[in-house]
Image (cartoon, rainbow, N blue to C red):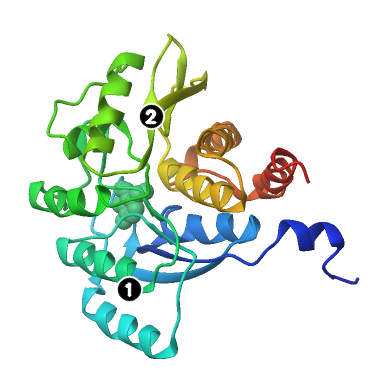
Amino acid sequence: MHFARTPRTIIAMKPIRILSVQDISCFGQCSLTVALPILSALGIETAILPTAILSTHTAGFKGFTFRDLKEDVPAIASHWEKEGIFFDAIYTGYLGNGEDVRNVIDLAKARNKGPLFVDPAFGDNGKLYGGFDQSYVECMKELCFQSDYLLPNLTEAAFLLDRPYEENVGKEEAEEIIQTLRAKGAKTVALKGVRFEDGKIGIAVSEGEGISYYSHSRIPTDFHGTGDVFASVFVAGLLRGLNALETGRLAADFVRGCIENTLGEEDHRYGVCFEPLLHDLEETLRKALGR
Ligand code: PXL
């Protein structure tokens, strides 16, 4: 078998190198174990900066281990500085503690030549993830309000704006949330989990001053790690050339496909079965780009 770059791949695959900063949850599909395969499948070279190593993610497992890596980050950053290493974008997810957040802000200033994507990754269903408190949220505000692309769910948006969490948010409230996040500094916002109509779920995405919406039918089951799947596809699609609404749509549809692909897998509640769909995802992205 022979593998080579065809004219088609050369056009589609202008090298793009990014840095993803998140934890490693050794078991359970989230954070880097989701981001790396998705970004790789979509042609994005991804360097990593793990902020912590956990035996599992924190939702649904008891007694997980947690090794904080924040003390390693300044030395890693200064080595990269000596080597003259820069990134075309930085994408952050679950960080772990306020010190990580400050390290990421410094890194983004020093080593990033492109957009900063921030998935706040600190809560869901109206609650913070275990181990996070209001002081973490206060640190995350600083990072989120410097982002070029902010990808919060409704819980994270509520905490970032100190407003009460509401499960059912229609277009008017979504618009108010987005415009307030933008007024605080986030440049483009893709708000997830908005329910415009019964039985549907979707996203509201700011594009300049305007807001666009996309929704599809809702599968009424929660799966873990879907925010990380969404963010990884969003980042890759945007960097490959889609606009924010197009890549938001691609990401939302992919998440839905992954959930469908996981239904019935009772043993798989620690994440979604996304791997068998990666090939189709790449083809769909390529078609959306017209290549
Ligand atoms: O999917 C977000 C996430 C990432 N990393 C860890 C988590 C979670 C959500 O619970 O626990 C360790």
Instruction: Using residue 199 as the reference point, say whether residue 40 is left or right of it.
Output: right
Amino acid on which the number 1 mark rests in the picture: Ala
Q: Position of residue 28 (x, y in %)?
A: 42, 54
- Rendering coords of residue 49 (x, y %): 38, 71
Residue placed most toward the observer, 116 or 233: 116
> Where is residue 110, by image quadrant?
bottom left
Q: Residues within 10 Å of mark 2 (few under 14, many from 20)?
A: few
**Disc 2 designates what residue?**
209
Determine the secondary structure under disc 2.
Answer: loop
Numbered disc 1: secondary structure? helix
Residue drawn 61% across the image and 52% down it: 240
Tell me which residue sits at (59%, 62%) in the image: 44
As shown in the figure, which amino acid type bears the numbered disc 2? Glu
Q: Which residue is mark 1?
A: 110
Q: Could you say where residue 261 lies in the image, as x and y percent from the top left?
A: 60, 36
Comparing 105 with 264, the one in front is 105
Q: Are marks 2 and 1 in contact (CB under 8 Å)?
A: no
Of pointers 2 and 1, the one earlier in the residue sequence: 1
Q: For the residue with label 1, is its CB less than 8 Å from the closest atom of ligand 1?
A: no
User: Taking 248 as reference, is 33 above or below it?
Assistant: below
- Residue at figure coordinates x 29%, y 47% from the top left: 120
How far apart are the alpha carbons under marks 2 and 1?
Answer: 29 Å
